[in-house]
Amino acid sequence: ETGVTQTPRHLVMGMTNKKSLKCEQHLGHNAMYWYKQSAKKPLELMFVYSLEERVENNSVPSRFSPECPNSSHLFLHLHTLQPEDSALYLCASSRGTAHTDTQYFGPGTRLTVL
Amino acid sequence: GQNIDQPTEMTATEGAIVQINCTYQTSGFNGLFWYQQHAGEAPTFLSYNVLDGLEEKGRFSSFLSRSKGYSYLLLKELQMKDSASYLCAVMDSNYQLIWGAGTKLIIKP
């Protein structure tokens, strides 16, 4: 139990669907992250939120839209995805964004786009 | 560009010792992390090195040489449950984590 939960754990969607991924952290952290993990590739940082403000957006296509309503919740809204977007989407949180602040990960959502 | 290199896969025997290497080329350095990720599970934090030398934590140790851009994770007295992927990540000058692709470690009886 890492204190970071993600739902759903598995998601299959068509290219025209709209869906959302949810992340919740119970650690009292101030920073939250979305990562994409594809097979045999490094983790790709997508978005970073610190105190509910987006501080990083790594050239992610607009079909991915993050939302951080409060410091405990993070969403990733998905719209008109492509098959190459199929991957494991990991959420993480940390106390802050300093170099000593360890990131704690959720179990991920395994996304398949048909 | 920024780059983290680690072997794709390694195999070791239960009870033995294994060393997983990581080399990095990043713009600046603010520490190196090792994470463990079992199949289908979340990555979990193992170690953080920011100064040169060896950090020991039970059966796991992590070494850093900043001048060589090199780190290794040493696992002793291997157990079957150590079968997992081991991810190396470096925090660059912008405090962004740059990740390696991970090393899949297979433990055989």
Image (tube, coloured by chain):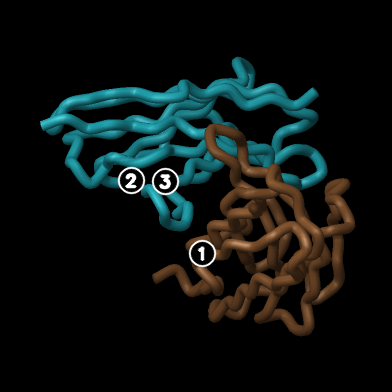
Chain colours: A brown, B cyan
Label disc, if present, on residue A31 of the rendered structure: none
Q: Nearer the viewer, residue A54 or B64?
A: A54
User: Could you tell me the amino acid type at mark 2?
Assistant: Lys
- Same chain check for tags 3 and 1: no
Q: Residue B15 versus residue B71: which sits nearer the camera?
A: B15
Mark sitting on residue B36: 3
| Disc 2 target residue | B57
Of tags 3 and 2, which is closer to the observer? 3
Q: Which mark is residue A10?
A: 1
Residue A29 x %, y %: 64, 74
Q: Label 2: chain?
A: B
**How far apart are the two marked residues, 3 and 2, measured between alpha carbons?**
14 Å
Q: Is residue B68 left or right of residue B79?
A: right
Q: Which three-letter amino acid code belongs to the residue tagged 1?
A: His
Residue B67: quarter of image: top right
Task: Please report, as a chain letter, where disc 1 is located.
Answer: A
Q: Quadrant of the N terminus of chain B?
A: top right
Going 71% across and 71% down the picture, which residue do you hit? A19
Residue at left offset 74%, top offset 67%:
A17
Q: Is residue B99 above or below residue A36?
A: above
